[in-house]
Image: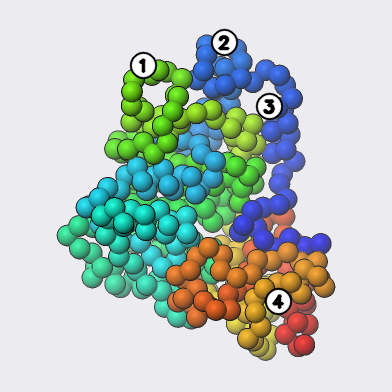
Amino acid sequence: MYYFDNAATTAQKPEAVARAVYNVLSSGTVGNPSRGAHGYALKAYGIVLQAKDDVKALFHCGPEYDVAFTHNSTAALNMVLKGLIHPGDGVLTTSWEHNAVLRPLYQLEAQGVSLAFIASDSPGGALQYDTLEERLTPRTKWFVCNHASNVTGNVLDLPRIKAFCQRHHLGLIVDVSQTAGAIDVDLSDGIVTAVCFTGHKSLYGPGGTGGIVIRRDALVTPYITGGDGVHSFEREQPSAVPGVFEAGTANVAGIAGLDAGIKQLLDGGVAAAAAHQEALARIFVPAVQAIPGIRLYGDFSGPRVGVYSLNIGDAESAVVSDILWQTYQMATRPAYHCAPLIHQALGTAVQGAVRFSFSQFTTADDVRAAVRALRAIAAM
């Protein structure tokens, strides 16, 4: 069997990740962090603090940032967007966004936030950066964007967006779900207000893990309130970062597993992970582009992650994906990938697209097998 759905979640994980989760659950010595001064609680707190330090190292964070763990990037994005953006604010975002960004923003729009979008070119899906200035309004306070499209694999020109936000004094919120662990994400300049990440993709952590890296001086309205283990007599959730995001019990076993995945990336280098994807792309892209009847979507002139969406003629993407699974035992993702605006730009709002996405466990032979399967299906 072949697993090509890593943009949804990485199914193959480093053995160290499973071992770290097991060790927490089986040791009988890990309690509830920040809920006591005994050894069980302190050991749990140490696991969480070490993981936070490794997240900061991964993203090259300076002392102006702190980290909070969440269940996934969807939870992180809801906490950040609804905690930072208020009625009357204006938000500039892009047509690349996942529904984890779009749906919270639409909720905020109903509460009095104004939205404006940077459109994409068709059929490549490249963002129209030259329209940035004209999309600004006097109300615009925030730029919200994903770092890479989960449909095309194209990577945002983040340095250009940072410069734009600095020039116009905008807060910048970045969804790095597809890039964390796949390419370098550098927060050392302190320009980004917050990034939201998930643990179960290119960080190779367990499902149900993710988090927020956010400037300590960010003014956040609590989205989820409850016990924080310290300020028990206060009626309001503490608003300081990172505690404003940390109501309730942490997933210590999951955080330990996530940290094990991050440690392997830190040891091996994110550049090596990116180089592996580039090597696979050199096999996959030209071979697929040469197959008659296949349309491969995206802009291949710039940086990208290992995500590739395609269609074969007018065939429904679900049908092609089903053939790949039933005949070739290849797991792919059909349809719309929770990103409706980019599908409208690509002209695939009806057909959807078949997505192949690779991981560090994907081999060159796996990719060649995918090309052979696509060639055979296209010839049918």
162 or 244, which is in the foreground? Answer: 244
Give the residue type that dot 1 points to. Answer: Phe
Instruction: Please say if the residues under marks 2 and 4 sit with CB atoms less than 8 Å apart.
Output: no
Going from the N terminus, do you reach mark 3 or mark 1 first? 3
Alpha carbon distance from label 3 to label 2: 17 Å
145 or 264, which is in the foreground? Answer: 145
Give the residue type that dot 2 points to. Answer: His
Q: Position of residue 350 (x, y in %)?
A: 55, 79
Give the residue type that dot 4 points to. Answer: Val
Dot 4 falls on a residue whose secondary structure is: helix
Alpha carbon distance from label 3 to label 4: 43 Å
Alpha carbon distance from label 2 to label 4: 57 Å
Q: Which residue is mark 4?
A: 319
Q: Which residue is mark 1?
A: 233
Dot 3 falls on a residue whose secondary structure is: helix
Q: Which residue is mark 3?
A: 24
Answer whether residue 62 is visible to the viewer in this image: no
Residue 105's image quarter? bottom left
